[in-house]
Image (cartoon, rainbow, N blue to C red):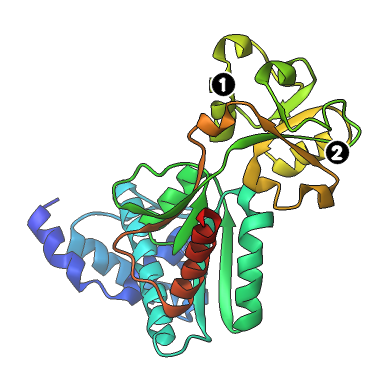
Amino acid sequence: MGRSRIVGALPRLPLEVLRHVVLIAECGSTVGAAQIVNMTASSLSRKIAQLEHDLGVPLFERHSRGMRPTDAGQLVTDAARQILARMDRLASDIGDVDEMGRGLVRIYASQALVEHFLMPHVARMAIQHPNVKIELHVGAGRQAERALIDESADFALILTVPRHPEIEIVAERANRIVAIVSPDHPLAQRRAISVAEVLAQPFAALPPSYSSRAAFNTLAPEALLGVQPQFTANSIAALKAYALAGLGIAIVPELTVGDAPGEQGLVLIEIIGAERTDTRMCLCRRQSRMLGNAARRLLDDFVAAFAAHHT
């Protein structure tokens, strides 16, 4: 395929054609896609054939059961989805410029931060501005990074330090690892315990790939060599349930417990040395991303919460 030909054709692609490409890829045929856009299948086929002619490369494999994107077609489809999402977002942002009471905010957050840190701010926004729409996606740190880069998220709250050079840490907060137990646990009256004391009891923790588990493992690497928790789960709720049931100690990030763990029936105990580990909560955004009024307002609310923690 000629590069100059493609470079010349791409800027002229109308958004309508990009939507057609995405629809055909999702429906697997021009018939299904045509029904959605209220066109005839033959008319839609001609538009795609013209696009393939302009680019000089087939975008779909035709077979008896429908159509499937070629490698080039998959590239075009993926790019089309991103372009259409940006255009939809641009329309929302333009409509949000002059009116704070409306808009759309997309947030990615680590599951552990949703209940006690994120939701109080989201609830306040929902009460003050009921016409603002908020989309929350729960995902791991790397998923959030990808969402920030492809602009499917306005900002993210994650428990890992982002690696991508285009992602800015707007604010950060220490998030040490702690132990939680039920009130009748033998260690419930202790203010702080050592890793050795944790290992002497049945305990639960997040999987090794999680930053808080990795931080715990650095506190006593030799003692932890070959040691496995009695219970491993990638759910903070499951770890809390383990502790509440009196089964043992659960090792969790402090911010997942909230400001009043006693209200949940839990006792929080410091782990000696945990303050030296580099465990943080990061509020992140893409540097070049222009935010609408609603997203900026909610982001500022989170920044203020981070600042209040340090004062």
Where does the image place residue 259, in percent across and percent down from the top left?
A: 70, 53
Q: Position of residue 10 (x, y in %)?
A: 20, 65
Q: Is residue 191 left or right of residue 57?
A: right
Tell me the distance, in whole angstroms, between the alpha carbons under discs 1 and 2: 25 Å
Q: Residues within 10 Å of mark 1 (few under 14, many from 20)?
A: some
In this rendered view, identify the residue nearer to me: 77 or 249.
249
Per the rendering, the mark at residue 183 is none
Mark 1 or 2, which is nearer the eye?
1
Comparing 65 with 130, the one in front is 130
Quick one: label 1 or label 2, which is nearer the N terminus?
Answer: 1
Mark 2: secondary structure: helix
Percent across and percent down for residue 23 are: 45, 66
Identify residue type, mark 2: Leu
For the question of whether residue 160 can be seen, the reply is: yes
Position of residue 131 relative to residue 89, above or below, is below
Residue at the bottom extreme, as displayed: 98
Residue sitting nearer the eye, 236 or 69: 236
Residue shown at 41% from the left, 76% from the top: 292
Residue occupying the far right of the picture = 184
Q: Looking at the image, which residue is at 53% across and 86% down?
A: 101
Q: Position of residue 209 (x, y in %)?
A: 55, 30
Q: Any mark on residue 219, and which?
A: 1
Dot 1 falls on a residue whose secondary structure is helix
Q: Is residue 63 visible?
A: no
Q: Going 86% across and 45% down the picture, which residue do you hit? A: 265
Residue 179 position (above or below residue 254): above
Look at label 1 and name its amino acid.
Answer: Leu
Numbered label tally:
2
Residue that carries the numbered disc 2 in the rendered image: 244
